[in-house]
Amino acid sequence: MEVQGKVKMIGETQTFGNNGFRKREIVVTTEEQYPQHIMVEFVQDKTDLLNNYQVGQNVKISINLRGREWVNPQGETKYFNSIQGWRIENLQAAAPQGAPDMPPVPPADAFEPASNLNTEDHDDLPF
């Protein structure tokens, strides 16, 4: 799946616990009738992917939806969802810079009618 939009915020890399788990969040605002502010987290070595991006850039983020179950001390089961990014692309770099150059069109007087046609030659085309 993918999310496209304009970067609204890029957080700092956070490190948790003794195992060195790393997480970094980015918020992207979609460009649609009702814009949505989508928070996507990048984890572990993927946190470095955000180093080359800035607020205001149009990006496309490849994501995975993650869900987990947790039972609290009272025995109640809770469910949590997260959106995890694994690739990010700058859409402005992918946009074409302009129309491709077209070869010049020769002027209309550059074309001459064929003069070596024999009107008695029969056309053998079926149409």
Image: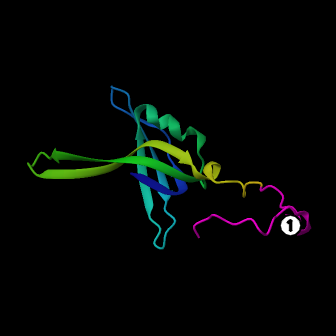
On the image, the x and y values in percent for residue 57 come to 60, 53
Task: State the residue at coordinates (63%, 64%).
Answer: 124
Residue 29 or 100: which is nearer the viewer?
Answer: 100
Q: Is residue 107 located in the magenta-colored stretch of the structure?
A: yes
On the image, the x and y values in percent for residue 108 come to 87, 68
Task: State the residue at coordinates (39%, 47%).
Answer: 63
Q: Is residue 59 left or right of residue 22?
A: right
Residue 65 or 43: which is nearer the viewer?
Answer: 65
Q: Is residue 52 left or right of residue 72?
A: right
Furthest residue toward right: 109
Residue 69 or 101: which is nearer the viewer?
Answer: 101
Q: Is residue 16 left or right of residue 107?
A: left
Q: Which residues are magenta?
A: 102-127
Furthest residue toward bottom: 33
Circle 1 residues within 10 Å: few <14, some 14–19, many ≥20? few
What's the residue type where badge 1 is placed? Pro
Furthest residue toward top: 19
The secondary structure making up most of the magenta span is: loop
The C terminus is located in which quarter?
bottom right
Helix, strand or loop at mark 1: loop
On the image, the x and y values in percent for residue 78 come to 17, 52
Task: State the residue at coordinates (43%, 52%).
Answer: 2
Q: Which residue lies under the disc numbered 1?
A: 113
On the image, the x and y values in percent for residue 29 come to 50, 61
